[in-house]
Image (cartoon, rainbow, N blue to C red):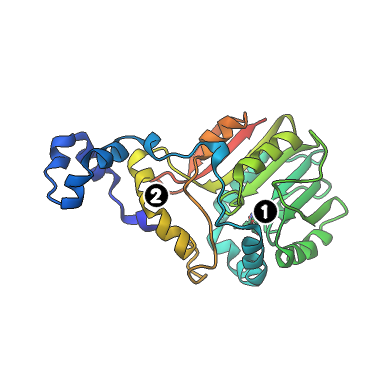
Amino acid sequence: MRAYRNYDVNAIQELVAAGPERLSSVEHTGFTKHESEIIRLVESRDAYMIAPDRLDQNYLDEDLVRGIYSSTASIFESVADKHFPPVPRALAQSWLSVSPADRVLEIAVATGANLTAYPRCTEVIGIDISEESIKLAKTKASSLGPGFRVELMNAEKTNFGDRYFDKVLVLCGLCVARNPFRILQEVRRVLKPNGAFVLYEPSLSGIKEVDLLLYLLQPIGRDLGAVWFDDFPARTIPYNTFWDLPEMLKATEFEIEETVFFDAPYNTLRMSKCRA
Ligand SMILES: C[S@@+](CC[C@H](N)C(=O)[O-])C[C@H]1O[C@@H](n2cnc3c(N)ncnc32)[C@H](O)[C@@H]1O
């Protein structure tokens, strides 16, 4: 949902800073009846947050997500550069700073848009749950050399050994996955100590006025499929912004080294560089 695009964060902050007396002047029977609960929600994120290990985005059922990304793989391929503009892709590569000796895992590789950016003799493995996306990514991987491989695999449960990879990348893969916490635990397991992990994801912002709006819009977003990609009709690209990425990284013991936001002043779309 991008409804917060025209949301005036400053005005809401001023309203809240003015205190409960100002809010109480709102004449609305629903408000009067639920005043204390509404003020509690407005004033504290904790009133509606879900603990990182309890987030189960069951509306992002694996079969549903696989089916959607398989049936839209060629459309995704044709618009991928528009929705994932070069800036975040280039920043991800510069933060990963892949050298030919590295083993790299790319989670939610989709149609393989990032594959050409890695040094040619690196070992790069891309995984995704969408068969049709993997087919398109395979064509790219096979033209890049023997080190490049893509596989159909759920990132929540991979078959890689512990501490196998030097670097891991995920661009907008956690927000569409049923259980991002499990994926982060899996990344923690397969990444070498001190390995680099770069992610680019929409999530809660940490600004309570923005997060409250995302909380309130959640039922509509779920029903419409969190419309964001203008090229896809409603209910075709489901994803979730109502999850707390920094909190989840903390819970899986990643250290966040750097973060850049791509939608200031709302700060819901971020790229972070982390260490295992
Ligand atoms: C928005 S696309 C990713 C875009 C891609 N990273 C890029 O840079 O172009 C989201 C992808 O996540 C994949 N996905 C969703 N859940 C997954 C899971 N549990 N494991 C692996 N891939 C998953 C979907 O199949 C889809 O291809």
Q: Which residue is mark 2?
A: 214
Q: Earlier in the sequence, mark 1 or mark 2?
A: 1
Are the residues flagged by discs 1 and 2 in contact, CB closer than 8 Å? no
Splitting the image into four quadrants, where does ligand 1 fall? Answer: bottom right
Residue 273 appears in view: yes
Q: Quadrant of the C terminus?
A: top right
Q: Amino acid at mark 2?
A: Leu
Question: Measured from the top left, where is residue 169 in percent x and y?
Answer: 67, 45
Question: Measured from the top left, where is residue 129 in percent x and y?
Answer: 71, 58
Q: Residues within 10 Å of mark 1 (few under 14, many from 20)?
A: many
Residue 181's image quarter?
Answer: top right
Question: Measured from the top left, where is residue 165 in percent x and y?
Answer: 78, 38
Residue 67's image quarter?
Answer: bottom right
Secondary element type, mark 1: loop
112 vs 253: above or below = below
**Circle number at residue 108:** 1
Q: Amino acid at mark 1?
A: Ala
**Which residue is at the front of the view, 85 or 109?**
109
Point 37% across, 39% down: residue:
207
Question: Measured from the top left, where is residue 92 in percent x and y?
Answer: 62, 45
91 vs 67: above or below = above
Q: Residues within 10 Å of mark 2 (few under 14, many from 20)?
A: many
Q: Quadrant of the N terminus?
A: bottom left
